[in-house]
Amino acid sequence: MGNFPVIIFDFETTGLSPQMGDRPIEVGAVLIEGNKVTHQFQSLMNPGFTISSFIESYTGIGNDMVQSAPPCEEVMEQFAKFIGKYPLVAHNASFDLKFLDSEMGFIGKSRTNDAACSMLTARRLYPHAPNHQLGTLVRHCGVYTDGIFHRALADAEMTGRLWISMIEKIKNTFGVKPITFELMQKLSSISKAKAPHYLRDLALQQSSPELF
């Protein structure tokens, strides 16, 4: 029924590109099992250089906060244990995955986890949302929020609630069940126009396999 375990994660970073030397300054993650948050992970981290005033104002994370935080490598060792082999989800996953892969490289590890993007999936399920930023989507879908964004754990929790909401929508609107992680991945790669047809056909296949 979509009860597969998954880890939703989010990085706050010093900039947009690990290739240009940017590093994470905070990571937040939640483990969702049975469509409920069962564990969480959060830590600030010291990137080893000064954070720009723009990033300070955007994230609310100041240089004074990361100065006493553990270095990225120490936090990433702990985070690698937390994520294990669980499938991963992030909102605009290409951004967070490039930082995750870069940081894993610094500690001599490589990611083998499957991954999905909640933003791409949401574009297929909510094509008429004003936009597909996380804050807009949680309001559009009526997902509970405490109004805090651009802190890693808060954004991971919001993305987790959005993820659960999307699974419920697929079940209730299209009648698809069970829902797998592979289905959520596949949905994000189908064109927006074809997504409803794909889900309706899948529900029909599940309910009447003898027709296929």
Image (cartoon, rainbow, N blue to C red):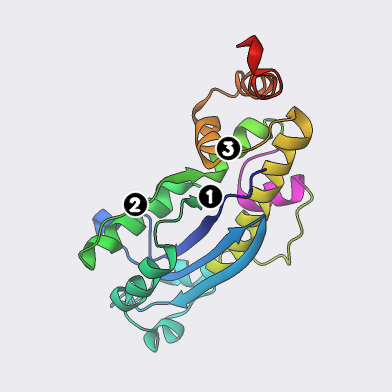
Kind of element beneath mark 3: helix
Q: Which image quarter holds the C terminus? A: top right
What amino acid type is highlighted by mark number 3? Thr
Q: Are marks 2 and 3 in contact (CB under 8 Å)?
A: no
Q: Measure the alpha-carbon separation of dots 1 and 3.
A: 9 Å
- Taking the view exactly as shown, the residue that stands out farthest to the front is 210
Residue 85 found in image quarter: bottom left
Q: Are marks 1 and 3 in contact (CB under 8 Å)?
A: no
What residue did someone put label 2 on?
98
Disc on res. 36: none
In front: label 2 or label 3? 3
* Residue pictured at 77% horizontal, 59% vertical: 144
Q: Earlier in the sequence, mark 1 or mark 3?
A: 1
> Residue 78: x, y in percent?
37, 74
62 inside magenta stretch? no
On screen, 121 above or below 40?
A: above
On screen, 183 above or below 66?
A: above
* Residue pictured at 32% horizontal, 51% vertical: 112
Q: Measure the alpha-carbon separation of dots 2 and 3.
A: 19 Å
> Residue 155: x, y in percent?
59, 61
Q: Measure the alpha-carbon separation of dots 2 and 1.
A: 13 Å
Q: Which image quarter holds the N terminus? A: top right
Q: Which residues are magenta?
A: 129-141
The residue carrying pointer 2 sits among few (fewer than 14), some (14 to 19) or many (20 or more) residues within 10 Å by Cα, namely some
Q: Earlier in the sequence, mark 2 or mark 1?
A: 1
The residue carrying pointer 1 sits among few (fewer than 14), some (14 to 19) or many (20 or more) residues within 10 Å by Cα, namely many
What amino acid type is highlighted by mark number 2? Lys
| Residue 149 at least partly seen | no
> Residue 206: x, y in percent?
66, 24
What residue did someone put label 1 on?
91
What residue did someone put label 3 on?
121
Kind of element beneath mark 2: helix
